[in-house]
Image: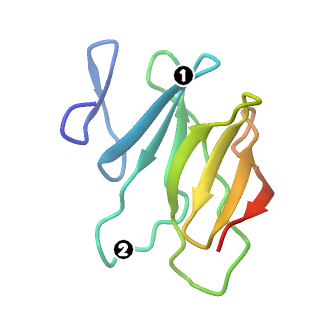
């Protein structure tokens, strides 16, 4: 990443907003983008293949009453699961095949 731009194998990858976090995980590049202030973009995590092609975009969180509830971080857990933490205080395990989510904890 360079100033919010993701570069894969020398080529700039076009994402809807600047990249703020990227993880190399099980053959995928998992990227979290940061929507502009005032923009609602709740599916702000993508998985890219080794060539930079988008494999999936994360499922929107069904929890919480807020309309604006983007993911605020991605991490790999101690038991090697991809975790996406959401603005609404819920951590989700993310399925690598399709970006679907399963709630695993509530932290607010």
Secondary structure beneath disc 2?
loop
Secondary structure beneath disc 1?
loop
Q: Position of residue 8 (x, y in %)?
A: 35, 20
Color encoding of the figure: rainbow
Residue denoted by label 1: 49
Residue denoted by label 2: 39
Q: Residue at x 65, y 19 (%)?
A: 26
Q: Position of residue 92 (x, y in %)?
A: 72, 53
Q: Quadrant of residue 82?
A: top right
Quadrant, the C terminus: bottom right
Answer left or right for 71 relative to 40: right
Q: Residue at x 67, y 56 (%)?
A: 59
Quadrant, the N terminus: top left
Which disc number belongs to residue 106? none
Q: Which residue is at the front of the view, 25 or 76?
A: 76
Q: Residue at x 65, y 87 (%)?
A: 65
Q: Residue at x 36, y 62 (%)?
A: 35
The image shows residue 78, relative to residue 11, as above or below, that is below
Q: Residue furthest top?
A: 9
Answer left or right for 96 relative to 58: right
Q: How many marks?
A: 2
Query: In 3D space, how far apart are the residues under numbered discs 2 and 1 (Cα atoms)?
Result: 27 Å
Mark 1 residue crowding within 10 angstroms, few (<14) / some (14–19) / many (20+)? some
Q: Position of residue 32 (x, y in %)?
A: 45, 46
Q: Quadrant of residue 51?
A: top left
């Amino acid at each position: 990443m360079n100033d919010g731009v993701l570069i894969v194998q020398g080529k700039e990858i076009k994402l809807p907003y600047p990249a703020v976090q990227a993880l190399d995980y099980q053959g995928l590049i998992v990227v979290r983008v940061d929507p502009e202030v005032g923009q609602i973009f709740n599916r702000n995590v993508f998985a890219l293949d080794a060539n930079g092609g988008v494999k999936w975009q994360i499922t929107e969180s069904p929890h919480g009453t807020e309309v604006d509830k983007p993911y605020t971080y991605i991490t790999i857990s101690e038991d090697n699961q991809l975790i996406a933490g959401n603005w609404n205080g819920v951590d989700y395990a993310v399925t690598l095949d399709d970006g679907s989510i399963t709630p695993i904890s509530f932290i607010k």
